[in-house]
Image (spheres, rainbow, N blue to C red):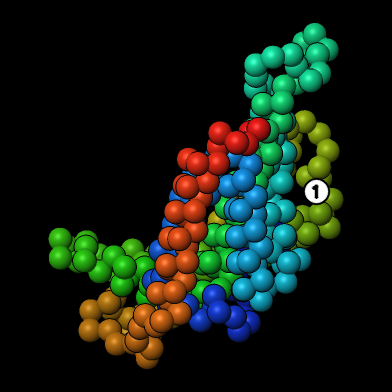
Amino acid sequence: MKSISLGQYYAVDSPIHRLDPRIKIVLAVLYIVIVFLCSNIASMALLLVSALVIVLASNIPIKIVLKSVKPILFIIAFTAIINIFWTKGEGAPLLDLGFIQIYSKGIVNAIFLVTRIFVLIVGSSILLTYTTTPISLTDGIERLLGPLKKIGLPVHDFAMIMTIALRFIPTLMEEADKIMNAQKARGADFTNGSLIQRAKALIPILIPLFSSSIRHALDLATAMECRCYRGGEGRTRMKILKCRASDILALVAVIAFGVAIVCINIFAAPYLPF
């Protein structure tokens, strides 16, 4: 649970940390689109290089970054196995055991899928949560969605809800960890038994966790009311968001990277084995 990256901010000084939060949100969206545009081995290799560049530019230890992937290792392994054993390709299979047939296409699809998920988690977590404080993320979302205010949408409330949700994910994970340790000290078993039995064993965790989350919400609401919070109306900001040359340069670099990926997919595909 401590490996959950959503809502965690790693406070160091880096070029990515200094970027405008609006630009980082746009970069994260563009990067996610680029991840799904990669369709051959050359573009995938370039994608891995870009993920390494992002990690190095963020000054975040690689150990911390890899921990963000740990919670979804089961999903990655499961989807890779599904692709390896259920994808049929042309020609003779690499392994034929009668009821099990493994083709090269299945292995390639599994590698591509694992790479996409890994880069997606690493890139999005670094560009947003690890390098952006919740307050900056709220301001960035609100400014980006500002034009929607003209049609009556509560943009500030929406941005605040999203940011508070991200902020309290690590808190709830920590609460769940404490509750699990307390239940284990009382003899609770969460690892043995059938799937239904293990699911029933989680009930003593979920009820206190819901109670704790409601208590946190009430305390937060009381604190906001005591500070005369009335939404975004008439609100002033200590730091005014301004795009600098480094922000524009980062945006141009990601766009150029996306164009390079598209060009590789179009022109290099006939010369690549897969």
The amino acid type, in three-letter code, at marker 1 is Ala
Residue at screen point 66% across, 63% down: 52
Q: Is residue 72 visible?
A: yes
Q: Is residue 12 above or below residue 123?
A: below
Q: Is residue 158 above or below residue 88?
A: below
Q: Percent x, y for residue 214? A: 50, 62
Q: Is residue 265 above or below residue 216?
A: above
Residue at screen point 45% across, 60% down: 256
Q: Percent x, y for residue 84? A: 71, 27
Q: Which residue carries the number 1 mark?
A: 188
Q: Percent x, y for residue 79? A: 66, 34
Between residues 199 and 183, which one lies in front from this camera angle? Answer: 199
Residue at screen point 21% across, 66% down: 147
Looking at the image, which residue sits at the far top? 98
Using the rendered view, name the quadrant where residue 152 is placed. Answer: bottom left
Q: Is residue 170 visible?
A: no
Residue at screen point 83% across, 38% down: 192
Looking at the image, which residue sits at the far left? 151
> Helix, strand or loop at disc 1?
loop
Between residues 96 and 99, which one lies in front from this camera angle? Answer: 96
The N terminus: image quadrant? bottom right
- Left or right placement of residue 61 versus residue 170 in this view: right
